[in-house]
């Protein structure tokens, strides 16, 4: 008979399925955060993201290459059947490419600003989760310390444990980090 009491796999399956449920819940929560971020984007953000995705693709490189080759071929009289419309030094081409570069740069900056804001939000969320996890871990250590004290279990890590049981002061850690980092 296989069950948790007799060393069977029933308990292991229960733990595995619980871990899978926890993982699935975590994935859903992350997906929900990302969906909220996506839904909060303005039309300009969405347009900028679409344009930078297209401009940064392989087909965009091919289209530009073909466009420049055809433009130069026509205006250098390499295609005799088509009259030149932008003779050397290709002022019209220069203006069009310059305008394209200006607008593409603006779209990229809008996309980068949005990504930076989302990264900042994620970093703050990570910080909050890490602070909560640190407090939970400290509580677990306190409980284990009390249990080991009650059971009269002694170990050689007592001083390290006492240090870990102290409350972590985020402001003090941040100040120490600021003091240690080189000035920019």
Image: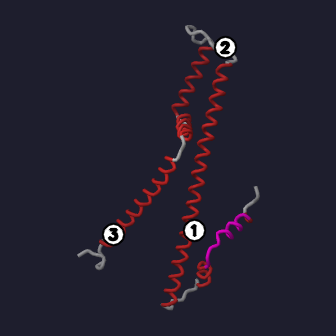
Please give the residue where the numbered disc 2 appears in the rendered image: 87
Please give the residue where the numbered disc 1 appears in the rendered image: 131
Please give the residue where the numbered disc 3 appears in the rendered image: 14
Alpha carbon distance from label 2 to label 1? 65 Å
Seen at 74% across and 65% down, the residue is 179
Residue 162, quarter of picture = bottom right
Residue 3, position as x, y percentages in the image:
27, 75
> The N terminus lies in which quarter of the figure?
bottom left
* Secondary structure under the numbered disc 2 in the rendered image: loop
Alpha carbon distance from label 3 to label 1? 30 Å
Label at residue 152: none
* Secondary structure under the numbered disc 3 in the rendered image: helix
Q: Is residue 34 left or right of residue 162?
A: left
Alpha carbon distance from label 3 to label 2? 76 Å
Seen at 49% across and 90% down, the residue is 150
In this view, 104 is above or below 92: below
Q: Earlier in the sequence, mark 3 or mark 1?
A: 3
Specify the segment rendered in magenta: 166-178
In this view, 107 is above or below 83: below
> The C terminus lies in which quarter of the figure?
bottom right
Residue 93, quarter of picture = top right
The answer to if 95 sits in the magenta stretch is no
Dot 3 alpha-carbon crowd within 10 angstroms: few under 14, some 14 to 19, many 20 or more: few
Protein image colouring: secondary structure
Residue 9, position as x, y percentages in the image:
30, 71
In this view, 77 is above or below 17: above
Q: Earlier in the sequence, mark 3 or mark 2?
A: 3
Q: In the orientation shown, which residue stands out farthest toward the left?
A: 1
* Secondary structure under the numbered disc 1 in the rendered image: helix
Dot 1 alpha-carbon crowd within 10 angstroms: few under 14, some 14 to 19, many 20 or more: some
């Amino acid at each position: 008979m296989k069950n948790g009491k007799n060393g069977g796999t029933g308990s292991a399956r229960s733990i595995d399925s619980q871990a899978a449920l926890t993982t699935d819940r975590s994935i859903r929560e992350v997906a929900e955060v990302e969906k909220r971020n996506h839904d909060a984007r303005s039309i300009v953000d969405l347009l900028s993201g679409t344009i930078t995705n297209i401009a940064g693709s392989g087909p965009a490189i091919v289209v530009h290459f073909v466009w420049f080759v055809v433009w130069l071929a026509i205006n250098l009289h390499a295609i005799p059947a088509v009259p030149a419309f932008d003779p050397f030094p290709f002022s019209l081409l220069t203006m069009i490419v310059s305008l394209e570069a200006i607008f593409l740069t603006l779209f990229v900056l809008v996309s980068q600003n949005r990504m930076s804001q989302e990264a900042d939000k994620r970093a703050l969320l990570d910080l909050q989760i890490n602070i909560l996890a640190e407090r939970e871990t400290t509580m677990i250590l306190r409980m284990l310390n009390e249990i080991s004290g009650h059971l009269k279990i002694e170990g050689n890590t007592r001083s390290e444990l006492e240090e870990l049981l102290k409350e972590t002061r985020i402001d003090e850690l941040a100040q120490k980090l600021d003091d240690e980092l080189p000035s920019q």
